[in-house]
Image: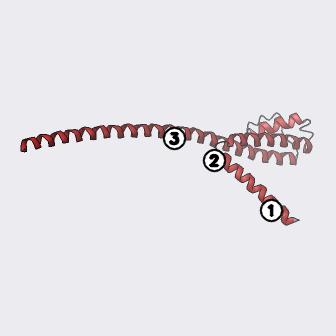
């Protein structure tokens, strides 16, 4: 039974890893990050209402605190006072900073990629124009060379 569990867990991890790699490669990671943040906020909001019902009497309070903490805003209007509440808060803070870092890196990467594509397009246009100018110059030189050769042949003959 444990071998079966380990193999299913490994398959699940490989599937998640593969999806994450495809999302990053296709530049769709923003949706996954936003979805993961929303799911985490909902889960944490629910969890803190269970473990610290004094500080978070409603799910709405727990969700508000989770969103504010994940967003690294930290208004301080609702805070955990129990040990377990603070443990959850610490994990949520680290997750929030991590998600915001990934989000910033993703958006920055998209801007840099767009700039590189634009520069590459302009460079290719310049190379094509330059190549066309070189061909025209070469054609003109060949025509002049042929004209000179014809004149030399006429003088000799």
| Quadrant of the image occupied by residue 35 | top right
Mark 1 and mark 2 lie on one chain; the one further toward the N terminus is 1
Residue at 83% from the left image edge and 48% from the top image edge: 87
Instruction: Using the numbered discs, state the Cα–Cα distance from disc 1 to disc 3 in whole angstroms.
Output: 42 Å
- Is 84 placed left or right of 146 in the picture? right
Please report the residue visible at 74 percent of the width from the left and 38 percent of the height from the top. Answer: 71
Q: Looking at the image, do the residues carrying marks 1 and 2 touch, with CB atoms under 8 Å apart? A: no
Q: CA distance from mark 1 to mark 2?
A: 27 Å
Question: What element does badge 2 sit on?
Answer: helix
Lower position in the chain sequence, tag 2 or tag 3 = 2
Residue 28 placement, left or right of 8:
left
Q: Which residue is mark 2?
A: 25
Q: List the residue tagged with mark 1.
A: 7
Asked which secondary structure carries label 3, the reply is helix
Residue 105 picture location, percent across and down: 63, 43
Would you place residue 149 above or below residue 5 in this image? above
- Of mark 1 and mark 3, the one earlier in the sequence is 1
Q: In this orientation, which residue lies closer to the viewer: 48 or 78?
A: 48
Tell me, yes or no, whether the two marked residues, 1 and 3, touch with CB atoms within 8 Å.
no
State how far apart marks 2 and 3 are (Cα): 16 Å
Q: Split into 4 quadrants, where in the image is the C terminus? A: top left
Asked which quadrant contains residue 6, the reply is: bottom right
């Amino acid at each position: 039974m444990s071998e079966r569990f380990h193999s299913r867990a490994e398959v699940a991890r490989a599937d998640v890893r593969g999806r994450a790699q495809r999302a990053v490669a296709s530049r769709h990671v923003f949706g996954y990050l936003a979805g993961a943040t929303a799911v985490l906020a909902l889960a944490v909001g629910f969890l803190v209402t269970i473990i610290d019902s004094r500080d978070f009497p409603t799910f709405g309070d727990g969700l508000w605190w989770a969103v504010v903490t994940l967003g690294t805003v930290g208004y301080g209007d609702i805070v955990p006072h129990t040990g377990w509440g603070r443990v959850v808060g610490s994990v949520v803070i680290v997750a929030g900073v991590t998600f915001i870092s990934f989000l910033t890196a993703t958006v920055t990467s998209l801007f840099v990629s767009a700039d590189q594509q634009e520069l590459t397009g302009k460079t290719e246009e310049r190379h094509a124009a330059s190549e066309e100018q070189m061909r025209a110059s070469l054609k003109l030189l060949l025509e002049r060379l042929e004209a000179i050769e014809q004149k030399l042949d006429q003088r000799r003959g």
